[in-house]
Image (cartoon, grey):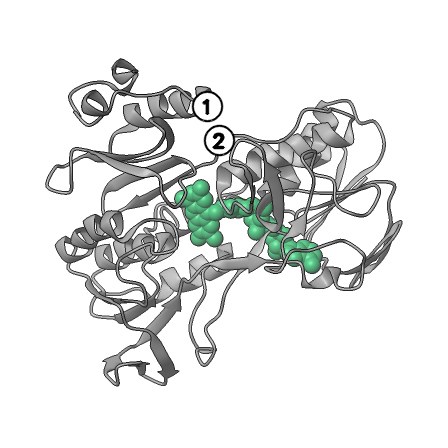
Amino acid sequence: MVVVGAGLAGAQCALKLRQGGWAGRVVLVGEEPHAPYDRPPLSKDVLLGKADSTTLDIDFAQLGVELLTGRRATGLTPGVLHTDGGDLPYGSLVIATGATPRALPGAERAHLLHTLDDALALRGLLRPGLRLVLVGAGWIGAEVSTAARQAGCEVTVVEAGPAPVPGALPAEVGAAMAAWYAEAGVDLRCGVGVAAVEPGAVLLADGSHLPADEVLVGVGARPATGWLAGSGVELDAAGAVLVDERLRTSLPGVFAAGDCVSYPSARSGARLAVQHWDHALRSGEAVAAAVLGAEEPYDPVPYFWSEQFGRMVQYVGRHAEGDELLWRGGPQDAEWSVLWLRDGVPSALLAVDRPRDLTQGRKLIERGTALDRARAADPAVPLKGAVA
Ligand SMILES: Cc1cc2nc3c(=O)[nH]c(=O)nc-3n(C[C@H](O)[C@H](O)[C@H](O)COP(=O)(O)OP(=O)(O)OC[C@H]3O[C@@H](n4cnc5c(N)ncnc54)[C@H](O)[C@@H]3O)c2cc1C
């Protein structure tokens, strides 16, 4: 059994294979020099100086899992994984190579934030007065802004979309987050793209120059699947590994999990490519179960969180174009939530410092329970008390 990609999904898969009774050899192959670690703290506690290491609490040696670090997969032919350290024959293979951050053309000089080494290097640069330009007001942009302001940096965020998180949230909701940047003393410039990153400056598409000592690009990630070219493993147009509801790829005996996959969600009526921690954990576990013969389809309600500007932001479910937006409280309040309704049934919920809304909303989404709009819009009414 070979698992390629020693991130959360791969590590979880190896652990669950052993716990599920897999008695044969398990080899976990990863290109990074480190044992598997958690990424969410990289843009939070690590940047803030509260943690130096985020290693997962899994004893691979005790589990009898052979962990090969510093070893990069370079190709795949049926039955053999090719790596820069030699071939590894397999009976079954799990692909869990995750996603790598998108670079910006013309911005090769800019930093990216994906690995522990990236986070430690960036932390070493943050100092009072440093002029830091962040490209992208997504989750990474907001979290790095938070840490950089705490370190006393002068932070400018450039976002091509009309408001923060344009890919994931409607502008109306993103606009409520724009105020957090202003409060934190971050100069947020929306609706303008980056033309070039030059030494000491960022040139914007509107012709303006932003002085910059350091630049970090946080504009999303793409599946790390280039190494699968010519292998026969089918990918979608974005490069995600196409798996079925049991996380099986188009090649017999080859499965995939985590940030690198696109899976069919009956719940959502669409294929989903989710690049969040909860999905990596759950699909890592589910792929081990699938290898061991389980038949249950993988289709959880997606969930993620972000900690930014002193706030806990949580999102559960998946909204679609045309869903009705319902606010519980609003940007003027210290805490608020937004619900998306489809025929009165919640499809998704975004909670800002309202963890109870998240817990209750998740159950309502899972069960497909219709809500009474007037009560659901009243933040004083617990969501579970707003059932139609
Ligand atoms: C800075 C940061 C902060 C985040 N914060 C949050 C958060 O707050 N909330 C949340 O829900 N999610 C967050 N995420 C996302 C979450 O961490 C990811 O969804 C999760 O790590 C995905 O796990 P994975 O195992 O699928 O992929 P990865 O974690 O990307 O692991 C894949 C591993 O495979 C290795 N690999 C790639 N190609 C090869 C190859 N050819 N050969 C060998 N090895 C290879 C990679 O080096 C990597 O170590 C954050 C991500 C980052 C980067």
Query: Where's residue 235, x and y in %?
Result: 69, 55
Beta carbon at label 2 within 8 Å of ligand 1: no
Dot 1 alpha-carbon crowd within 10 angstroms: few under 14, some 14 to 19, many 20 or more: some
Res 79 visible: yes
Relative depth, front residue between 238 and 101:
238
Relative depth, front residue between 354 and 171:
171
Write down the quadrant of residue 193 in the picture.
bottom left
In this rendering, the answer to whether 364 lies above or below 272 is above
Query: Where's residue 286, x and y in %?
Result: 65, 31
**Where is the C terminus found, in terms of image quarters?**
top left
Amino acid marked by disc 2: Val
Sequence-first tag of 2 and 1? 2
Classify residue 122 as left or right of residue 252.
left
> Do the numbered discs 2 and 1 sit on residues whose CB atoms are within 8 Å?
yes
**Where is the N terminus found, in terms of image quarters?**
top right
Classify residue 43 as left or right of residue 325.
right
The residue where tag 2 is placed is: 301
Relative depth, front residue between 232 and 66:
232
Amino acid marked by disc 1: Glu
Query: Where's residue 279, x and y in %?
Result: 54, 38
Residue plotted at (68% across, 24% down): 296
The residue where tag 1 is placed is: 366
Secondary structure type for disc 1: helix
Residue plotted at (45% across, 19% down): 367
Secondary structure type for disc 2: loop
In this rendering, the answer to whether 363 lies above or below 141 is above
Residue plotted at (43% across, 38% down): 318
Query: Where's residue 285, x and y in %?
Result: 64, 31
- Residue 323 marker: none
Write down the quadrant of residue 363 in the picture.
top left
Dot 2 alpha-carbon crowd within 10 angstroms: few under 14, some 14 to 19, many 20 or more: some
